[in-house]
């Protein structure tokens, strides 16, 4: 099997390291059938766009040390939901397609766990900044979560 990395420098570390093991002919089949391969790529593109948008928003607001506008938690929730969707798909892929191949399934499951932890950290950072009196520390923490 070959290893395909989906990488974007604007994504969080856990998302950047998501890897999907597959055989090239299976990937082509999945793409032509509009099945799991296309679903994963679509979710990752949406997640990438959402994270990039959130990151740019946070950078601008951090520079101003602004109060947290309502759309920041809403955007973070959208990123988290997309992350959860990708985690569910990755776990399904690992358990349904690669259950008999632990050398393939385990890295997928590990990346899914990392992504899940990153999403949790993002929500914790949003909760911190929305309740903290120290906005500068809150923005710094939120930026680190992006």
Image (tube, rainbow, N blue to C red):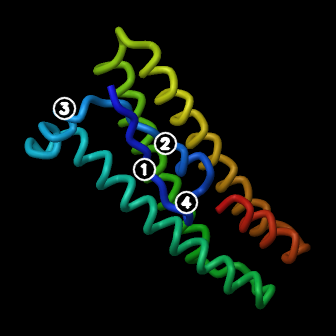
Q: Is residue 26 left or right of residue 47?
A: left
Question: Would you call the spot at circle 2 few (<14 residues within 10 Å), some (14-19), or many (20 or more)?
Answer: many
Q: Is residue 62 left or right of residue 31?
A: right
Mark carried by residue 18:
2
**Cα distance between the residues tagged 4 and 1:** 10 Å
**Cα distance between the residues tagged 3 and 2:** 18 Å
Mark carried by residue 11:
4
Chain-order first, disc 3 or disc 1:
1
Mark carried by residue 72:
none
> Decide: marks 2, 1 in contact (CB < 8 A)?
yes
Tell me what residue is drawn at x 60 percent, y 38 percent: 114
Q: On the image, numbered disc 1 is attached to which residue?
A: 6
Q: On the image, numbered disc 3 is attached to which residue?
A: 26
**Cα distance between the residues tagged 3 and 1:** 17 Å
Q: Secondary structure at mark 3?
A: helix
Residue 31: x, y in percent? 16, 45
Tell me what residue is drawn at x 43 percent, y 68 percent: 49
Q: Secondary structure at mark 4?
A: loop
Chain-order first, disc 3 or disc 4:
4
Chain-order first, disc 4 or disc 1:
1
Tell me: residue 63, above or below residue 12.
Answer: below
Tell me what residue is drawn at x 9 percent, y 45 percent: 32
Q: Is residue 136 left or right of residue 119?
A: right
> Decide: marks 3, 4 in contact (CB < 8 A)?
no
Chain-order first, disc 3 or disc 2:
2
């Amino acid at each position: 099997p070959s290893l395909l990395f989906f990488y974007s420098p604007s994504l969080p570390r856990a998302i950047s390291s998501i890897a999907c093991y597959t055989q090239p002919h299976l990937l082509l089949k999945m793409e032509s059938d509009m099945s799991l391969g296309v679903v994963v790529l679509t979710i990752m593109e949406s997640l990438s766009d959402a994270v990039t948008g959130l990151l740019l928003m946070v950078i601008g607001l951090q520079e101003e040390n602004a109060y947290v506008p309502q759309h920041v938690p809403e955007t973070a929730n959208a990123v988290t939901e997309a992350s959860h969707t990708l985690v569910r798909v990755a776990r399904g892929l690992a358990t349904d397609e690669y259950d008999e191949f632990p050398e393939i399934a385990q890295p997928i499951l590990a990346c899914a766990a990392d992504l899940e932890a990153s999403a949790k950290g993002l929500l914790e950072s949003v909760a911190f900044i929305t309740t903290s009196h120290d906005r500068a520390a809150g923005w710094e923490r939120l930026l680190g979560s992006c």
